[in-house]
Structures are given as C-alpha cells and as structure tokens.
C-alpha cells in the first residue's frame, strides 16, 4: 500500500518502515500472588481482585424473569485502576446453558488526593449493545456502591437513562444487585447474583 503524499501530508509516517515490535511487555493479573504489585490506592478493593463465577436472577417490567450464569474477572496491571470484565449466559430450569447473554467491560478508578485513595470511586462500564455508563460511587469496607452520573448511547441502543449498582464481598463471595432505568421506567431492580472465587 502506498501512503499518500500530498501538500497537506508531505512526509511519510514514522511507523511506515519501522521494524516490528514484540508482544505487549507488561503483565496484567487477577491473582495477587503473581504479576505486578497492587497499587496502594486499590488496597480497599483488594478482595475483589480475582475470577468469580456463579449464578443470578434477572428481570424487568418489559421482559420475563430469567436465570443466568456469570463470570467476572477483576484484574490490575500495577496502576491505580481495576479492569472489570463480565460474561453472562442464560440458563434453563436444569441450569443448562441456553445462549450467551450480557457482556460488559469496564474500569474502576479510585479518586485520589495526591497518591492516597479518598474512598470515592469512578467507573466506566461499556456493553457491546451500545450503552456506556459513567458511575460515581463510594466504598464502605468491602462494599462498593455506584450510581450513574451519565449514560451515553449509540443511535441504535436501548433507551437506558440511569443505573445503580451495589457490590459486596460477603462470606468470601461476590454479591451484587443492579437497578436500571430504561424504556420509560424509573430505577427498577434488574440483576442480582452471587459469585464464588474460582481464580486468583
């Protein structure tokens, strides 16, 4: 491929004939026994780091209630944020998988005063269905509560206008409940689950 040279772009880009690079050289870990050291600002959420798997129940006024399986991976790379990845799948009455369900990717960031965490948190949560939520929240012990500050949607996404999430570590398990305001309804219970640690 020839890179276009014009009056507006008289030079070839510096990467055009550069040598290839090695694979990404920095480790990310969901296991506190390996990889980079957890950033001190994340100490309050240290119990969340890991891989979690379990089941939940969902519903909304516009759909029938449903059971689902879910796996959440919470990892870090030594910097002051956590990476949150979630995959869910629908379950039948015998707990057999029916089909893939919700997926989500996000980032949890402590609000810092200098290098110290304040107890306040910010989170970006993004779905492949075209919804991105900016959450603001607080940590109390091992409980983390978020509420939306803003929701951004693609033109074809479902009309989601607000959300509220509560996470907690209870007797070694990750529990959460999620409320959603969408398609003309106010904040309404939508998802809740109990996940056990399977990695990390």
Image (spheres, rainbow, N blue to C red):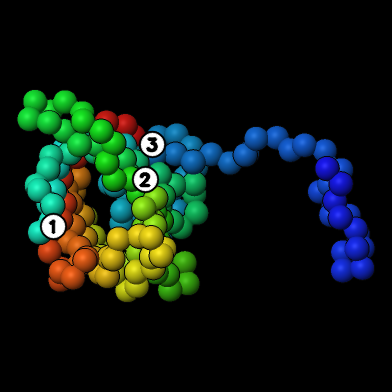
Q: Residue at x 12, y 39 (%)?
A: 67
Image position of 89 with respect to 110: above or below:
above
Query: Which label lies toward us, 3 or 1?
Result: 1
Crowding near pointer 1: few (<14 within 10 Å), some, many (20+)? few
Classify residue 59 as left or right of residue 17. left
Classify residue 60 as left or right of residue 42. left
Residue occupied by mark 1? 62
Query: Which label lies toward us, 3 or 2?
Result: 2
Q: Which residue is drawn at 49% across and 41% down?
A: 28
Residue occupied by mark 2? 85
Query: Which label lies toward us, 1 or 2?
Result: 1
Q: Which mark is residue 180?
A: none
**Would you say the residues marked 3 and 2 are in contact, meaning their CB atoms lie under 8 Å apart?**
no
Q: x%, y% of residue 122?
A: 36, 66
Q: Quadrant of the N terminus?
A: top right
Q: x%, y% of residue 113?
A: 43, 73
**Earlier-in-chain disc, 3 versus 2:** 3
Q: Which residue is drawn at 91% across and 63% down?
A: 6
**Earlier-in-chain disc, 3 versus 1:** 3
Q: Residue at x 35, y 49 (%)?
A: 104
Q: x%, y% of residue 34?
A: 45, 34
């Amino acid at each position: 491929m020839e890179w276009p040279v014009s009056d507006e772009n008289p030079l070839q880009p510096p990467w055009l004939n550069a040598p290839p690079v090695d694979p990404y050289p920095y480790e990310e870990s969901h296991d506190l026994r390996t990889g980079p050291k957890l950033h001190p600002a994340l100490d309050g959420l240290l119990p969340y780091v890991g891989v979690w798997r379990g089941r939940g129940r969902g519903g909304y006024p516009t759909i029938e209630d449903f059971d689902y399986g879910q796996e959440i991976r919470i990892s870090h790379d030594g910097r002051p944020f956590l990476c949150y990845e979630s995959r869910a799948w629908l379950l039948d009455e015998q707990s057999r998988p029916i089909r893939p369900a919700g997926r989500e990717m996000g980032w949890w960031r402590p609000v810092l005063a200098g290098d110290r965490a304040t107890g306040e948190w910010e989170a970006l949560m993004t779905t492949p269905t075209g919804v991105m939520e900016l959450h603001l929240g607080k940590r109390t012990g091992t409980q983390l509560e978020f509420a939306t500050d803003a929701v951004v949607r693609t033109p074809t996404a479902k009309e989601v206008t607000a959300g509220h999430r509560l996470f907690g570590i209870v007797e070694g398990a990750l529990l959460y409940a999620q409320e959603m305001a969408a398609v003309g309804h106010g904040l309404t219970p939508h998802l809740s689950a109990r996940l056990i640690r399977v990695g990390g």
